[in-house]
Amino acid sequence: MPRIRAVLRATRSFLGRRWRVVLRTPRAARRAVSAVRRALAPLASASWPVLTSRATVTIAGLLLGFAAIVAMVAGVWLGWPHLYDYLAPQTAGERKDVVLIVVQVIGVTGILFGLIFTYQRLRAAERTIQVAQEGQITERFTRAIGQLGEPKLEVRLGGIYALERIAGDSPRDHWTIVEVLTAYVRENAPWKGDSEPATAADAPAPAANVALPPAVSTVRPRTDIQAILMVLGRRPERARTEERRNNLALDLGGTDLRGAQLIRARLERADLLAAHLEGAILAGAHLEGAFLWGAHLEGADLRATHLEGAILTTAHLEGADLWDAHLEGAGLWDAHLEGATLWDAHLEEANLSRAHLDGAHLEGVDLSGALGLTRQQLASAITDENTLLPDYLRDQGGAPPSTP
């Protein structure tokens, strides 16, 4: 016991002398303050270069660690006598346990500060990597945009697919890239009348076993335009969900997309105002809520196409194949459906007010949920005994008003 007390007294005496030299000697204190000021002076200078995040965290961590060590030493020096007197160990084993507890507390505190410092370094490293990645994406984006203006088709295609890759790697740039691609289509494929596309020679061949109307069978988009349409039509679900949340829609209004191949394309809520899609292949495409006011879809393949809630006012659907098409809640006011095939089409809540149904194939079609129909409209349509009419048009026998 005398030896342990001697060691404790010697330790407190040593720490007391050290701290009195630093804190209680004015000359030493002034020297310490001057040294700290000289060390921090460059940080306050306007000419000092801007520190990187890693350097800043390193310096802050060192200062924090130094402060922690000083605080622990001061706590041991100041608090040890009180702790020792409070615990009042009687045996050598108890005194040893007290010393071990203090050492463990100091060790755990040091580990915690080390973890905090390591975490800050990792955060700084992540920010550095993020900045580097953003710089690479910006460089890739600029290079891809430049490729779109090249005269060679291969270079333009490379730029288009590079932009698609960037949109996948950087979700924050997805909509910017979509706007670039849609603007490219609007500028390079605007509707100019009945003239053929300027570069029909590089247009892709039509899909096999697909019969297009004679008037549009040889009219197809340029290869780069078709590539952009494919890229836009296969946007990932995550990106489409974000677009829907922010009420964003593709703008392809007034474009010449005759003969375009858009099988199962995801074009929900797309703006296709007065767009020309004659002979386009849209089988299984998703056009829910699309704005197709005045659009031209003559002879288009719309089999099993999703047009729920779409606006098709004054749209031209002459000769279009709408077999099994989903038109629930669609607006077909004044739409032109002359000669269109609507077998097994879903027309629940579809508004057909003043729609032109001359020669439209409605054999076996369920019109019981359709809105705005009149006997005059159905008089020129092709119906049979299996055509189901709305209650407000059904006669006592349940037959259609006319069966040409």
Image: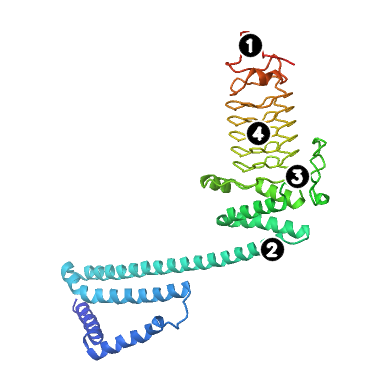
Q: What element carries label 3?
A: loop
Task: Quadrant for the C terminus, please.
Answer: top right
- Residue 53 is situated, as x and y percent measured from the top left of the image, at 47, 72
Observer-nearest residue: 4 or 231? 231
Sequence-wise, which precedes: disc 2 or disc 3?
2
Q: Is mark 1 on a helix, strand or loop?
A: loop
Name above or below for residue 312 compared with residue 39.
Answer: above
Q: Which amino acid does label 4 sit on?
A: Thr
Query: Are the residues tagged 1 and 4 within 8 Å (C-beta)?
Result: no
- Residue 364 is situated, as x and y percent measured from the top left of the image, at 69, 19
- Residue 114 is situated, as x and y percent measured from the top left of the image, at 39, 69
Give the CA distance from mark 2 to mark 1. 64 Å
Give the CA distance from mark 1 to mark 4. 30 Å
As drawn, is 292 to the left or to the right of 35? right
Q: What residue type is labelled 3?
A: Gly
Disc ID at residue 398: 1
Query: Are the residues tagged 4 and 2 within 8 Å (C-beta)?
Result: no
Q: Residue at left 27%, top 88%?
A: 30
Q: Residues within 10 Å of mark 3 (few under 14, many from 20)?
A: few
Q: Which residue lies furthest to the bottom in this view?
A: 27
Q: Mark 2 points at which residue?
A: 146
Sequence-wise, which precedes: disc 1 or disc 3?
3
Disc ID at residue 193: 3
Closer to the eye: label 1 or 4? 4
| Total tally of numbered discs in the picture | 4
Disc ID at residue 314: 4
- Residue 274 is situated, as x and y percent measured from the top left of the image, at 67, 41
Q: Is mark 2 on a helix, strand or loop?
A: helix
Q: What residue type is labelled 2?
A: Gly
Give the CA distance from mark 2 to mark 3. 30 Å
Query: Are the residues tagged 2 and 1 within 8 Å (C-beta)?
Result: no
Give the CA distance from mark 1 to mark 3. 46 Å
